[in-house]
Image: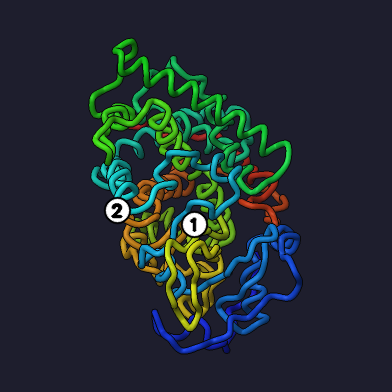
Amino acid sequence: MAAKHVAEQRSPFIVAPLMSEKHSQVPQASGFDSTLSFLREGYDFISNRCDDLGTDGFETRVMLRSVLCLRGESAVSLFYGQDLFTRKGAMPPSTLRLLQDKGSVQSLDGEAHRHRKRMFSQLLVGTPPDRMVSLFERHWRKAEEIWIANGETELFSASNLVLTHAAWEWGGLPADTMDIDDLCDQLVGMVENAGRIGPRMWRELARRAALERRLERLIVQLRKGEIKAADDAPVSFITRWIDSDGNELSAKVAAVELINLLRPIVAIGRWILFSAMALHRYPQWQIRIAAGADEWIEPFVEEVRRTYPFFPVIGGRALRPFSWGGKRFDSGQWVMLDLFSTNRDARIYPDPLAIHPERAPSWRDQDFRFMPQGAGDLRKDHRCPGEWLTVSIMSSAIRLLTRDMRYQVDDQNLDMPMNRLPTRPKGGLRIRLADHTIQSAD
Protein backbone atom coordinates (compact mmCIF):
# COMPACT_ATOMS: atom_id res chain seq x y z
CA MET A 1 0.00 0.00 0.00
CA ALA A 2 2.86 2.35 -0.69
CA ALA A 3 1.81 5.87 -1.61
CA LYS A 4 3.51 9.22 -2.03
CA HIS A 5 3.32 11.75 0.74
CA VAL A 6 1.38 14.88 -0.06
CA ALA A 7 3.61 17.52 -1.64
CA GLU A 8 4.91 20.28 0.60
CA GLN A 9 4.35 23.10 -1.95
CA ARG A 10 1.16 23.61 -3.90
CA SER A 11 -0.12 25.98 -6.54
CA PRO A 12 -2.52 28.73 -5.46
CA PHE A 13 -5.35 26.63 -6.86
CA ILE A 14 -7.59 25.33 -4.07
CA VAL A 15 -5.70 27.28 -1.47
CA ALA A 16 -7.70 30.47 -2.12
CA PRO A 17 -10.86 30.99 -0.03
CA LEU A 18 -14.19 29.66 -1.18
CA MET A 19 -15.77 31.74 -3.97
CA SER A 20 -12.54 33.73 -4.41
CA GLU A 21 -12.35 35.84 -7.56
CA LYS A 22 -8.55 35.73 -7.63
CA HIS A 23 -7.44 34.16 -10.88
CA SER A 24 -5.41 31.00 -10.72
CA GLN A 25 -4.44 28.75 -13.57
CA VAL A 26 -5.53 25.14 -13.09
CA PRO A 27 -2.69 22.79 -14.07
CA GLN A 28 -3.30 20.49 -17.00
CA ALA A 29 -2.13 16.88 -16.81
CA SER A 30 0.13 15.81 -19.65
CA GLY A 31 -1.35 13.86 -22.54
CA PHE A 32 -4.60 14.20 -24.41
CA ASP A 33 -6.55 11.57 -22.45
CA SER A 34 -5.76 9.86 -19.13
CA THR A 35 -8.10 6.88 -19.30
CA LEU A 36 -5.36 4.29 -19.67
CA SER A 37 -3.30 5.98 -16.95
CA PHE A 38 -6.29 5.90 -14.59
CA LEU A 39 -6.83 2.19 -15.27
CA ARG A 40 -3.10 1.48 -14.84
CA GLU A 41 -2.57 3.53 -11.64
CA GLY A 42 -5.98 3.20 -9.98
CA TYR A 43 -5.98 4.53 -6.44
CA ASP A 44 -2.79 6.55 -6.99
CA PHE A 45 -3.83 8.24 -10.25
CA ILE A 46 -4.93 11.61 -8.82
CA SER A 47 -2.34 11.83 -6.03
CA ASN A 48 0.53 10.98 -8.40
CA ARG A 49 -0.29 13.94 -10.62
CA CYS A 50 -1.07 16.32 -7.79
CA ASP A 51 2.30 15.52 -6.23
CA ASP A 52 4.10 15.96 -9.56
CA LEU A 53 2.33 19.28 -10.25
CA GLY A 54 2.56 20.60 -6.69
CA THR A 55 -1.18 21.18 -6.51
CA ASP A 56 -4.41 19.78 -5.11
CA GLY A 57 -6.20 19.76 -8.43
CA PHE A 58 -5.67 19.42 -12.16
CA GLU A 59 -7.64 19.04 -15.36
CA THR A 60 -7.46 16.13 -17.76
CA ARG A 61 -9.68 13.92 -19.88
CA VAL A 62 -11.02 10.52 -18.90
CA MET A 63 -13.01 8.57 -21.47
CA LEU A 64 -12.49 11.65 -23.68
CA ARG A 65 -14.49 13.80 -21.23
CA SER A 66 -12.96 16.83 -19.53
CA VAL A 67 -12.68 16.27 -15.79
CA LEU A 68 -11.32 18.26 -12.85
CA CYS A 69 -9.54 15.99 -10.35
CA LEU A 70 -9.37 17.25 -6.74
CA ARG A 71 -8.10 16.15 -3.36
CA GLY A 72 -7.79 17.60 0.14
CA GLU A 73 -10.00 18.95 2.90
CA SER A 74 -10.98 22.15 1.07
CA ALA A 75 -12.06 20.21 -2.00
CA VAL A 76 -14.10 17.82 0.15
CA SER A 77 -15.86 20.77 1.81
CA LEU A 78 -16.71 22.14 -1.62
CA PHE A 79 -17.93 18.79 -2.92
CA TYR A 80 -20.05 17.73 0.05
CA GLY A 81 -20.86 20.91 1.95
CA GLN A 82 -22.22 23.37 -0.61
CA ASP A 83 -25.04 21.48 -2.44
CA LEU A 84 -23.30 22.35 -5.71
CA PHE A 85 -22.95 18.90 -7.27
CA THR A 86 -25.16 16.11 -8.50
CA ARG A 87 -24.19 12.45 -8.81
CA LYS A 88 -26.20 12.14 -12.03
CA GLY A 89 -23.96 11.51 -15.01
CA ALA A 90 -20.87 11.52 -12.80
CA MET A 91 -19.96 7.85 -13.11
CA PRO A 92 -20.18 5.32 -15.94
CA PRO A 93 -23.82 4.20 -16.38
CA SER A 94 -22.83 0.57 -15.92
CA THR A 95 -21.18 1.34 -12.56
CA LEU A 96 -24.17 3.39 -11.42
CA ARG A 97 -26.59 0.61 -12.33
CA LEU A 98 -24.48 -2.02 -10.61
CA LEU A 99 -23.98 -0.13 -7.35
CA GLN A 100 -27.21 1.89 -7.07
CA ASP A 101 -29.45 1.66 -10.15
CA LYS A 102 -32.05 4.10 -11.38
CA GLY A 103 -34.49 5.55 -8.89
CA SER A 104 -32.18 5.06 -5.90
CA VAL A 105 -31.46 7.67 -3.26
CA GLN A 106 -28.03 8.37 -4.78
CA SER A 107 -29.65 9.32 -8.09
CA LEU A 108 -31.76 12.06 -6.45
CA ASP A 109 -30.92 15.68 -5.63
CA GLY A 110 -32.28 18.45 -3.47
CA GLU A 111 -35.38 17.86 -1.38
CA ALA A 112 -36.16 14.54 -3.10
CA HIS A 113 -32.75 13.25 -1.99
CA ARG A 114 -33.09 14.62 1.53
CA HIS A 115 -36.53 13.07 1.93
CA ARG A 116 -35.44 9.62 0.69
CA LYS A 117 -32.29 9.89 2.77
CA ARG A 118 -34.47 10.20 5.87
CA MET A 119 -35.74 6.69 5.17
CA PHE A 120 -32.22 5.28 5.41
CA SER A 121 -31.31 7.55 8.31
CA GLN A 122 -34.25 6.35 10.36
CA LEU A 123 -33.29 2.74 9.68
CA LEU A 124 -29.55 3.12 10.24
CA VAL A 125 -29.04 6.17 12.46
CA GLY A 126 -32.26 6.57 14.41
CA THR A 127 -31.94 3.16 16.04
CA PRO A 128 -28.80 1.69 17.66
CA PRO A 129 -27.36 -1.16 15.56
CA ASP A 130 -27.53 -3.65 18.44
CA ARG A 131 -29.87 -6.15 16.77
CA MET A 132 -27.86 -6.32 13.56
CA VAL A 133 -24.63 -6.73 15.54
CA SER A 134 -26.22 -9.50 17.64
CA LEU A 135 -27.32 -11.32 14.47
CA PHE A 136 -23.84 -10.93 13.00
CA GLU A 137 -22.23 -12.42 16.10
CA ARG A 138 -24.68 -15.33 16.20
CA HIS A 139 -24.12 -16.23 12.56
CA TRP A 140 -20.34 -15.76 12.95
CA ARG A 141 -20.16 -18.23 15.86
CA LYS A 142 -22.30 -20.71 13.94
CA ALA A 143 -20.00 -20.43 10.94
CA GLU A 144 -16.94 -20.68 13.17
CA GLU A 145 -17.85 -24.27 13.96
CA ILE A 146 -17.57 -25.06 10.25
CA TRP A 147 -14.31 -23.14 9.92
CA ILE A 148 -12.79 -25.12 12.78
CA ALA A 149 -13.98 -28.41 11.30
CA ASN A 150 -12.39 -27.47 7.97
CA GLY A 151 -9.19 -26.34 9.68
CA GLU A 152 -8.77 -23.34 7.37
CA THR A 153 -10.99 -20.63 5.94
CA GLU A 154 -10.65 -17.72 3.59
CA LEU A 155 -11.75 -14.82 5.74
CA PHE A 156 -13.13 -12.51 3.05
CA SER A 157 -15.64 -14.93 1.55
CA ALA A 158 -16.47 -16.41 4.97
CA SER A 159 -17.25 -12.97 6.41
CA ASN A 160 -19.37 -12.07 3.40
CA LEU A 161 -21.56 -15.12 3.88
CA VAL A 162 -21.97 -14.45 7.61
CA LEU A 163 -23.00 -10.87 6.85
CA THR A 164 -25.48 -11.98 4.19
CA HIS A 165 -27.20 -14.38 6.59
CA ALA A 166 -27.37 -11.67 9.26
CA ALA A 167 -28.51 -8.92 6.88
CA TRP A 168 -31.30 -11.02 5.36
CA GLU A 169 -32.62 -11.99 8.79
CA TRP A 170 -32.37 -8.37 9.96
CA GLY A 171 -34.16 -7.17 6.80
CA GLY A 172 -37.21 -9.18 7.82
CA LEU A 173 -38.25 -11.26 4.80
CA PRO A 174 -38.85 -14.96 5.50
CA ALA A 175 -35.71 -17.11 5.41
CA ASP A 176 -37.19 -19.55 2.88
CA THR A 177 -37.80 -16.85 0.27
CA MET A 178 -34.14 -16.53 -0.72
CA ASP A 179 -31.13 -18.76 -1.37
CA ILE A 180 -28.59 -17.04 0.89
CA ASP A 181 -25.53 -18.45 -0.89
CA ASP A 182 -26.78 -17.05 -4.21
CA LEU A 183 -27.73 -13.75 -2.59
CA CYS A 184 -24.25 -13.43 -1.09
CA ASP A 185 -22.63 -14.13 -4.46
CA GLN A 186 -24.82 -11.53 -6.15
CA LEU A 187 -24.28 -8.79 -3.55
CA VAL A 188 -20.52 -9.35 -3.42
CA GLY A 189 -20.37 -9.40 -7.22
CA MET A 190 -21.89 -5.93 -7.42
CA VAL A 191 -19.04 -4.45 -5.41
CA GLU A 192 -16.24 -6.63 -6.76
CA ASN A 193 -17.03 -5.72 -10.37
CA ALA A 194 -18.04 -2.08 -9.97
CA GLY A 195 -14.72 -0.89 -11.37
CA ARG A 196 -14.50 -3.41 -14.19
CA ILE A 197 -15.44 -3.23 -17.84
CA GLY A 198 -16.32 -6.03 -20.21
CA PRO A 199 -18.13 -9.37 -19.87
CA ARG A 200 -17.89 -9.69 -16.08
CA MET A 201 -19.51 -6.29 -15.62
CA TRP A 202 -22.35 -7.20 -17.98
CA ARG A 203 -22.84 -10.52 -16.23
CA GLU A 204 -23.19 -8.78 -12.87
CA LEU A 205 -25.63 -6.23 -14.32
CA ALA A 206 -27.83 -9.08 -15.52
CA ARG A 207 -27.61 -10.75 -12.12
CA ARG A 208 -28.54 -7.52 -10.33
CA ALA A 209 -31.54 -7.07 -12.63
CA ALA A 210 -32.66 -10.63 -11.86
CA LEU A 211 -32.32 -10.02 -8.12
CA GLU A 212 -34.31 -6.79 -8.40
CA ARG A 213 -37.13 -8.66 -10.15
CA ARG A 214 -37.06 -11.35 -7.45
CA LEU A 215 -37.26 -8.79 -4.64
CA GLU A 216 -39.91 -6.80 -6.48
CA ARG A 217 -42.12 -9.90 -6.54
CA LEU A 218 -41.53 -10.44 -2.81
CA ILE A 219 -42.49 -6.85 -2.04
CA VAL A 220 -45.70 -7.21 -4.05
CA GLN A 221 -46.46 -10.40 -2.09
CA LEU A 222 -45.71 -8.58 1.16
CA ARG A 223 -48.09 -5.75 0.27
CA LYS A 224 -50.80 -8.27 -0.61
CA GLY A 225 -50.29 -10.11 2.67
CA GLU A 226 -49.20 -13.32 0.91
CA ILE A 227 -45.97 -13.34 2.94
CA LYS A 228 -45.34 -11.80 6.34
CA ALA A 229 -42.69 -9.57 7.86
CA ALA A 230 -42.59 -7.92 11.26
CA ASP A 231 -44.03 -4.40 11.33
CA ASP A 232 -40.70 -3.00 12.56
CA ALA A 233 -38.59 -4.90 10.01
CA PRO A 234 -36.58 -2.77 7.55
CA VAL A 235 -38.38 -4.33 4.57
CA SER A 236 -41.73 -3.30 6.05
CA PHE A 237 -40.41 0.21 6.66
CA ILE A 238 -39.25 0.53 3.04
CA THR A 239 -42.48 -0.96 1.72
CA ARG A 240 -44.57 1.59 3.65
CA TRP A 241 -42.36 4.62 3.00
CA ILE A 242 -44.16 7.67 1.58
CA ASP A 243 -41.83 9.46 -0.80
CA SER A 244 -41.55 13.20 -1.44
CA ASP A 245 -44.30 12.98 -4.08
CA GLY A 246 -46.77 11.73 -1.45
CA ASN A 247 -46.86 8.16 -2.77
CA GLU A 248 -45.44 4.82 -1.67
CA LEU A 249 -42.32 3.72 -3.47
CA SER A 250 -43.08 1.57 -6.49
CA ALA A 251 -42.31 -2.10 -5.94
CA LYS A 252 -39.37 -1.74 -8.33
CA VAL A 253 -37.83 1.23 -6.48
CA ALA A 254 -38.48 -0.45 -3.13
CA ALA A 255 -36.57 -3.50 -4.42
CA VAL A 256 -33.72 -1.25 -5.59
CA GLU A 257 -33.48 0.42 -2.18
CA LEU A 258 -33.67 -2.92 -0.34
CA ILE A 259 -30.63 -4.06 -2.32
CA ASN A 260 -28.98 -0.75 -1.50
CA LEU A 261 -29.56 -1.53 2.16
CA LEU A 262 -28.28 -5.11 2.01
CA ARG A 263 -25.32 -4.65 -0.33
CA PRO A 264 -23.39 -2.15 1.85
CA ILE A 265 -23.85 -4.41 4.88
CA VAL A 266 -22.28 -7.33 3.03
CA ALA A 267 -19.55 -4.97 1.78
CA ILE A 268 -18.40 -4.66 5.41
CA GLY A 269 -16.73 -8.02 4.77
CA ARG A 270 -13.97 -6.10 3.00
CA TRP A 271 -13.46 -3.96 6.10
CA ILE A 272 -13.37 -7.11 8.26
CA LEU A 273 -10.67 -8.49 5.95
CA PHE A 274 -8.69 -5.25 6.29
CA SER A 275 -9.17 -5.30 10.08
CA ALA A 276 -7.69 -8.79 10.29
CA MET A 277 -4.80 -7.71 8.05
CA ALA A 278 -4.16 -4.71 10.31
CA LEU A 279 -4.20 -6.90 13.44
CA HIS A 280 -1.67 -9.17 11.72
CA ARG A 281 0.50 -6.21 10.74
CA TYR A 282 0.25 -4.54 14.18
CA PRO A 283 0.41 -7.45 16.66
CA GLN A 284 0.91 -5.04 19.58
CA TRP A 285 -2.66 -3.82 19.04
CA GLN A 286 -3.95 -7.37 18.69
CA ILE A 287 -2.41 -8.22 22.08
CA ARG A 288 -3.68 -5.02 23.67
CA ILE A 289 -7.27 -5.50 22.47
CA ALA A 290 -7.25 -9.20 23.31
CA ALA A 291 -6.30 -8.25 26.88
CA GLY A 292 -9.53 -6.27 27.24
CA ALA A 293 -8.71 -2.73 26.06
CA ASP A 294 -12.22 -2.05 24.73
CA GLU A 295 -11.62 1.69 24.59
CA TRP A 296 -9.16 1.19 21.73
CA ILE A 297 -11.34 -0.98 19.50
CA GLU A 298 -13.30 1.78 17.77
CA PRO A 299 -10.25 4.04 17.27
CA PHE A 300 -8.44 1.06 15.74
CA VAL A 301 -11.44 0.43 13.46
CA GLU A 302 -11.49 4.05 12.31
CA GLU A 303 -7.79 3.97 11.50
CA VAL A 304 -8.36 0.84 9.44
CA ARG A 305 -11.11 2.64 7.54
CA ARG A 306 -8.88 5.69 7.05
CA THR A 307 -5.82 3.79 5.92
CA TYR A 308 -6.97 0.81 3.87
CA PRO A 309 -8.35 1.27 0.34
CA PHE A 310 -12.06 1.04 -0.35
CA PHE A 311 -13.41 3.07 -3.29
CA PRO A 312 -10.78 5.54 -4.53
CA VAL A 313 -12.86 8.43 -5.91
CA ILE A 314 -16.36 9.85 -6.01
CA GLY A 315 -17.73 11.72 -9.01
CA GLY A 316 -20.00 14.72 -9.32
CA ARG A 317 -21.22 17.25 -11.87
CA ALA A 318 -21.77 20.94 -11.12
CA LEU A 319 -25.45 21.79 -10.78
CA ARG A 320 -24.92 25.45 -11.72
CA PRO A 321 -22.07 27.85 -12.57
CA PHE A 322 -19.92 29.10 -9.69
CA SER A 323 -16.38 30.23 -8.92
CA TRP A 324 -14.08 28.75 -6.33
CA GLY A 325 -10.37 29.00 -5.70
CA GLY A 326 -9.98 31.10 -8.85
CA LYS A 327 -11.60 28.42 -10.98
CA ARG A 328 -14.82 28.95 -12.89
CA PHE A 329 -17.08 25.90 -12.73
CA ASP A 330 -19.56 25.69 -15.58
CA SER A 331 -22.86 23.88 -15.19
CA GLY A 332 -22.22 20.20 -15.85
CA GLN A 333 -18.49 20.37 -14.99
CA TRP A 334 -17.36 16.84 -14.16
CA VAL A 335 -15.31 16.49 -10.98
CA MET A 336 -13.57 13.47 -9.45
CA LEU A 337 -12.75 13.79 -5.76
CA ASP A 338 -9.93 11.62 -4.43
CA LEU A 339 -11.19 10.04 -1.22
CA PHE A 340 -8.27 7.67 -0.80
CA SER A 341 -5.42 10.19 -0.75
CA THR A 342 -7.39 12.75 1.28
CA ASN A 343 -7.84 10.18 4.04
CA ARG A 344 -4.06 9.73 3.97
CA ASP A 345 -3.16 13.43 3.73
CA ALA A 346 0.01 14.16 5.73
CA ARG A 347 -1.21 17.71 6.42
CA ILE A 348 -4.08 16.20 8.43
CA TYR A 349 -2.57 12.91 9.58
CA PRO A 350 1.19 12.86 10.27
CA ASP A 351 2.74 9.50 9.39
CA PRO A 352 -0.38 8.94 7.26
CA LEU A 353 0.26 5.39 6.07
CA ALA A 354 0.53 3.95 9.58
CA ILE A 355 -2.30 3.04 11.95
CA HIS A 356 -2.28 5.25 15.05
CA PRO A 357 -5.54 4.71 16.99
CA GLU A 358 -4.56 7.44 19.43
CA ARG A 359 -5.36 10.11 16.82
CA ALA A 360 -8.98 8.86 16.93
CA PRO A 361 -10.69 10.13 13.78
CA SER A 362 -14.38 9.31 13.98
CA TRP A 363 -17.46 9.12 11.78
CA ARG A 364 -19.24 11.04 14.53
CA ASP A 365 -17.29 14.19 13.67
CA GLN A 366 -19.05 14.39 10.28
CA ASP A 367 -16.43 16.81 9.01
CA PHE A 368 -14.48 17.07 5.76
CA ARG A 369 -11.22 15.50 6.95
CA PHE A 370 -12.24 11.87 7.37
CA MET A 371 -14.33 10.24 4.65
CA PRO A 372 -14.00 6.49 4.19
CA GLN A 373 -17.73 6.50 3.35
CA GLY A 374 -18.22 10.10 2.30
CA ALA A 375 -18.14 13.38 4.22
CA GLY A 376 -20.46 16.01 5.62
CA ASP A 377 -23.80 15.49 7.36
CA LEU A 378 -24.93 11.89 6.88
CA ARG A 379 -28.57 12.88 7.38
CA LYS A 380 -28.58 15.36 4.48
CA ASP A 381 -25.52 14.96 2.27
CA HIS A 382 -24.45 12.13 -0.03
CA ARG A 383 -22.68 10.43 2.86
CA CYS A 384 -23.34 6.80 3.69
CA PRO A 385 -25.85 6.67 6.58
CA GLY A 386 -24.57 3.25 7.62
CA GLU A 387 -21.29 4.26 9.26
CA TRP A 388 -22.54 3.61 12.79
CA LEU A 389 -23.52 0.10 11.72
CA THR A 390 -20.24 -0.38 9.83
CA VAL A 391 -18.09 0.66 12.80
CA SER A 392 -20.18 -1.43 15.20
CA ILE A 393 -19.89 -4.60 13.09
CA MET A 394 -16.16 -4.05 12.53
CA SER A 395 -15.69 -3.56 16.28
CA SER A 396 -17.59 -6.79 16.92
CA ALA A 397 -15.46 -8.63 14.36
CA ILE A 398 -12.27 -7.41 16.03
CA ARG A 399 -13.48 -8.66 19.40
CA LEU A 400 -14.31 -12.04 17.85
CA LEU A 401 -10.95 -12.24 16.07
CA THR A 402 -8.89 -11.29 19.12
CA ARG A 403 -10.85 -12.94 21.94
CA ASP A 404 -13.09 -15.72 20.63
CA MET A 405 -10.82 -17.30 18.04
CA ARG A 406 -7.43 -18.95 17.96
CA TYR A 407 -5.98 -18.89 14.49
CA GLN A 408 -2.73 -18.53 12.58
CA VAL A 409 -1.97 -16.56 9.45
CA ASP A 410 0.48 -18.58 7.36
CA ASP A 411 2.83 -17.00 4.87
CA GLN A 412 0.82 -15.73 1.90
CA ASN A 413 0.77 -12.86 -0.54
CA LEU A 414 -1.22 -10.02 1.00
CA ASP A 415 -0.27 -7.43 -1.61
CA MET A 416 -3.13 -5.40 -3.01
CA PRO A 417 -2.95 -4.31 -6.66
CA MET A 418 -3.70 -0.60 -6.64
CA ASN A 419 -5.13 -0.70 -10.16
CA ARG A 420 -7.88 -3.08 -9.09
CA LEU A 421 -10.99 -1.14 -8.05
CA PRO A 422 -11.91 -2.01 -5.34
CA THR A 423 -8.78 -3.83 -4.31
CA ARG A 424 -7.96 -6.58 -1.84
CA PRO A 425 -5.45 -9.43 -1.58
CA LYS A 426 -6.28 -11.97 -4.23
CA GLY A 427 -6.38 -14.79 -1.67
CA GLY A 428 -8.67 -12.93 0.70
CA LEU A 429 -6.54 -13.82 3.78
CA ARG A 430 -6.45 -17.52 4.64
CA ILE A 431 -6.48 -18.30 8.34
CA ARG A 432 -5.86 -21.66 10.01
CA LEU A 433 -8.05 -22.24 13.05
CA ALA A 434 -7.35 -24.25 16.18
CA ASP A 435 -10.11 -26.10 18.00
CA HIS A 436 -11.40 -24.41 21.13
CA THR A 437 -14.62 -23.88 23.01
CA ILE A 438 -16.76 -21.29 21.26
CA GLN A 439 -18.43 -18.95 23.68
CA SER A 440 -22.20 -18.96 23.82
CA ALA A 441 -23.96 -16.30 21.79
CA ASP A 442 -25.97 -15.58 24.91
Q: Nearer the viewer, residue 289 or 37?
A: 37
Q: Nearer the viewer, mark 1 or mark 2?
A: 2
Image position, residue 100 (x, y; %): 49, 41
Residue drawn at (63%, 36%), measured in percent from left and top? Answer: 152
Residue drawn at (55%, 40%), measured in percent from left and top? Answer: 97
Residue type beneath disc 1: Gln
Q: Nearer the viewer, residue 18 or 145?
A: 18
Image position, residue 174 (x, y; %): 38, 18
| Left or right: residue 28 compared with residue 311 | right
| Left or right: residue 424 compared with residue 294 | right
Does any portion of residue 415 appear in the rendered image? no
Image position, residue 207 (x, y; %): 60, 28
Read off the residue under disc 1: 286
Q: Decide: few, some or many residues near mark 1? Use Cα within 10 Å; few <14, some 14-19, many ≥20.
A: many
Residue type beneath disc 2: Arg
Read off the residue under disc 2: 379
Q: Nearer the viewer, residue 349 or 145?
A: 349
The C terminus lies in which quarter of the figure? top left
Q: Choose the circle earlier in sequence order: 1 or 2.
A: 1
> How far separated are the C-alphas under marks 1 and 2?
34 Å
**Secondary element type, mark 1:** helix
